[in-house]
Image (cartoon, rainbow, N blue to C red):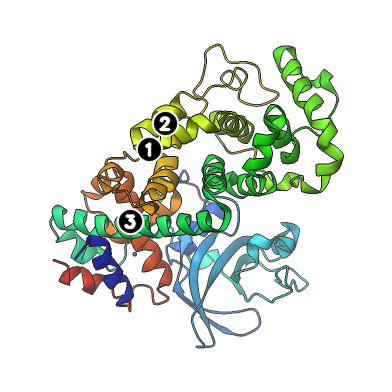
């Protein structure tokens, strides 16, 4: 039986790296209080402001990015059914309103608002859909003085016990099974897109999404949908201008804000864009869709958009690079992709770099191979596992680190299980299939027992 089939049976039969966060201090900050909440120092059973009994089944995952403070948490209210969602921890009850959570769709799945300071007047915690969220007040005076500043993103799960006793070869086989299962699902998804939109359109949309990475994946996907490849290829000389225009990056016609070479580049884009502007106004993306901060300069969405425009211009060469169904040939194509402006610029307003930069870097190429091209080759009947399992892991993310902590805890071999893309994908699949589906804080998860039986 193939490994993917074995993992599918396991799935159907039925969890981070520590980081020092704050220096020693006498008065706890909001960040420390959040950490102590997450560590369980305040306890697990509470009475809400409205008098409801609130039990914390799972504290979830500490989100150190934008949005609610804790994701994938599970609570019970008045001994009712377990409810999964996010938890927000603030210093004051009024912060829910003053911080704009009530109108932020990112907080729509909040199940609990925890705060320290209660105002003289009542503040209600409601979501954008006007759903009431239970409120719990905690008292820092009940905390002990001692506190460790090393707080993990997630707690080790019950599965770490059987996994730490398994030989590495067996764990590698488990991860490979989950990775193969995940790869097959991606291939099936791509095959469906091809059937619905055609081969070229499917590849274009998926590569565009991969260029957007997690911060701007939605924006790039919308661009690829609103400006189909067939249209861009038909308007080949104007395709870059159409992409930048619909993205909303050519709103200012004042060229005086640009200097030197950039002024000439933007002027050319603008000259090609303005004949289409009125017709395409309704297609333009809202500015708040873009995440322009918090990304490395090399990964700025304007650079990535320049790379997408270059790909459109070289589309026939790109298709030729796929004829051999070879990861190496496809990688060489992306490494050779050039643009005279974007090889030396980070954004439309940045100073030029003294040295040239790869238009699409090696880490992004690896992601395109893993998430688009190799699944695409598999969907066409090619054997790709040998190439897939050789892809080195170049990136990590919070979900991967969380899953690694849940499964392996303090196992000294832990780092060795995330060295390849296949290992990472297998970990993510297990985390999503078991950790994120469990509402019992590991107590009822079937994965630990299944691992003991895995041969």
Q: Residues within 10 Å of mark 1 (few under 14, many from 20)?
A: some
Cα gap from disc 2 to disc 3, whole angstroms = 22 Å
The image quarter containing residue 134 is bottom right
**Image disc number at residue 427:** 3
Q: Is residue 404 visible?
A: no
In terms of depth relative to the viewer, which is nearer, 76 or 348? Answer: 348
CB of mark 2 within 8 Å of CB of mark 1?
yes
Circle 2 or circle 3, nearest the eye: 2
In front: label 2 or label 1: 2
| Residue at image location 32% in from the left, 62% down from the top | 156
Q: Viewed as shown, does residue 194 lie left or right of 146? A: right
Please tell me how crowded label 3 is: few (under 14), some (14-19), or many (20+) other residues with Cα within 10 Å.
many
Q: Residue lying furthest bottom in this view? A: 79
Does any portion of residue 69 appear in the rendered image? yes
Placement of the N terminus among the 4 image quadrants: bottom left
Against 233, residue 16 (above or below) is: below
| Residues at circles 2 and 3 in contact by the CB criterion of under 8 Å | no
Q: Which residue is mark 2?
A: 362
Circle 1 — which element?
A: loop
Q: Which residue is mark 1?
A: 394
> At 52% from the left edge and 58% from the top edge, which residue is drawn?
195
Whichever of labels 2 and 1 marks the residue nearer the N terminus, that label is: 2
Percent position (x, y) of residue 401?
Answer: 38, 51
| Left or right: 9 in relation to 367 | left
439 vs 319: above or below: below
Q: Residue at x 81, y 24 (%)?
A: 271
- Label 2: how many Cα within 10 Å (few below 14, some 14–19, many 20+): some
Q: CA distance from mark 2 to mark 1?
A: 8 Å
Q: Quadrant of residue 154?
A: bottom left
In the rendered image, which quarter contains the C terminus? Answer: bottom left
Of pointers 2 and 3, the one earlier in the residue sequence: 2
Label 2: state its secondary structure.
helix
């Amino acid at each position: 039986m193939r490994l993917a089939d074995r993992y599918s049976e396991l799935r159907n039969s039925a969890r981070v790296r520590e980081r020092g966060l704050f220096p020693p201090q006498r008065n706890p900050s909001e960040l420390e209080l959040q950490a102590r909440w997450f560590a369980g120092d305040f306890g697990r059973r509470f009475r809400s402001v409205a008098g409801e009994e609130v039990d914390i089944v799972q504290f979830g995952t500490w989100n150190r990015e934008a949005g609610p403070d804790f994701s994938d948490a599970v609570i019970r209210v008045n001994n009712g059914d377990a409810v999964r969602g996010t938890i927000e921890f603030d210093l004051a009850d009024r912060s829910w309103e003053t911080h704009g959570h009530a109108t932020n769709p990112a907080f729509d799945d909040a199940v609990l608002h925890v705060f320290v300071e209660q105002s003289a007047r009542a503040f209600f915690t409601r979501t954008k859909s006007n759903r009431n969220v239970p409120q719990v007040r905690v008292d820092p005076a009940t905390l002990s003085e001692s506190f460790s500043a090393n707080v993990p993103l997630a707690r080790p799960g019950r599965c770490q016990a059987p996994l730490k006793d398994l030989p590495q070869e067996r764990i590698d086989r488990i991860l490979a099974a989950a990775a193969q299962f995940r790869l097959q699902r991606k291939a099936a998804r791509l095959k469906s897109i091809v059937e619905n939109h055609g081969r070229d359109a499917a590849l274009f949309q998926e590569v565009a999404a991969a260029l957007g990475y997690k911060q701007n994946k939605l924006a790039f996907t919308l661009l690829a949908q609103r400006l189909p490849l067939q249209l861009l290829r038909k308007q080949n000389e104007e395709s870059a201008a159409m992409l930048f225009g619909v993205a909303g990056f050519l709103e200012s016609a004042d060229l005086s804000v640009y200097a030197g070479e950039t002024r000439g580049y933007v002027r050319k884009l603008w000259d090609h864009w303005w004949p289409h502007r009125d017709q395409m106004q309704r297609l333009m993306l809202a500015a708040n869709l873009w995440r322009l901060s918090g990304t490395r300069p090399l990964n700025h969405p304007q650079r990535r958009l320049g790379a997408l425009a270059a790909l459109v211009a070289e589309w026939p060469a790109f298709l030729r690079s796929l004829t051999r169904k070879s990861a190496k040939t496809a990688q060489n194509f992306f490494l050779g992709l050039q643009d005279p402006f974007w090889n030396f610029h980070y954004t439309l307003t940045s100073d030029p770099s003294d040295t040239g930069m790869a238009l699409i870097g090696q880490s992004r190429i690896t992601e395109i191979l893993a998430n688009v091209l190799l699944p695409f080759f598999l969907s066409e009947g090619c054997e790709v596992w040998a190439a897939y399992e050789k892809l080195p892991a170049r990136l990590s993310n919070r979900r991967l680190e969380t899953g690694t902590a849940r499964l392996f805890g303090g196992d000294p071999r832990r780092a060795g299980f995330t060295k390849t893309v296949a290992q990472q994908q297998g970990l993510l699949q297990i985390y999503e299939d078991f950790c994120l589906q469990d509402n019992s804080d590991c107590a009822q998860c079937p994965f630990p027992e299944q691992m003991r039986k895995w041969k």
